Amino acid sequence: MHGSGTGNEGRVTAGGGVDQEFLALERELAVFLRRARAQSGEMAREVHPELEPAAYGLFVRLDDAGPQRATELAGYFGVGKATMSRQLRALEDLGLVARDPDPADGRASLVRLTEEGRSRFRSVRDARRERYVRKLADWDRAEVAELARLLHHFNVRSEG
């Protein structure tokens, strides 16, 4: 299923305006992203006071997907190799991630969470999840599942 199939998703209307649904989507995403960036900064600092906001997303990915090459992480997040290398070096210096030789290619390494990194991340993640449970307490579970499904669908369509 790839949208409504009307053929005019995101297009300018005959009167020169933009579809109101897409303007509303853009507006809500802008608010959501601004708040998400602020919360990522808070969560990263909760893991370790010296972390920058982008670090929290790295923890989420490494915890979910397991050890990854730095180039895979850079591609996943849509950032350059130099940016990813700098972010990983900072996490490594704090003892929150480590690099191990990639068994598939001895010239490459895999980045993984250390026990300290995993423990700190999961503590913050669990506290954050409890906040979501409280904020969405009046939502039906099916609504929460639908929001997660739609966000996943949007994220998959937004890759690359």
Image (tube, rainbow, N blue to C red):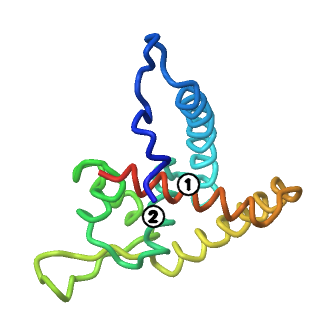
* Rendered position, 100 above or below 61: below
Residue 89 image-quadrant placement: bottom left
The secondary element bearing badge 1 is classed as helix
Which residue bears the numbered disc 2?
94
Measuring from the top left, give residue 3's x and y in whole percent. Answer: 47, 49
* CA–CA distance in space, label 2 to label 1: 32 Å
Mark carried by residue 151: 1
Residue at image location 54% in from the left, 76% down from the top:
118
| Side of 67 relative to 149 (left or right) | left
Residue at image location 40% in from the left, 27% down from the top:
11
Measuring from the top left, give residue 76's x and y in whole percent. Answer: 34, 59
Residue at image location 45% in from the left, 67% down from the top:
61
Measuring from the top left, give residue 153's x and y in whole percent. Answer: 49, 57
| Side of 89 relative to 2 (left or right) | left
Label 1 crowd (10 A; few <14 / some 14-19 / many >=20): few
Residue at image location 57% in from the left, 34% down from the top:
25
Q: Amino acid at mark 2?
A: Leu
The secondary element bearing badge 2 is classed as loop
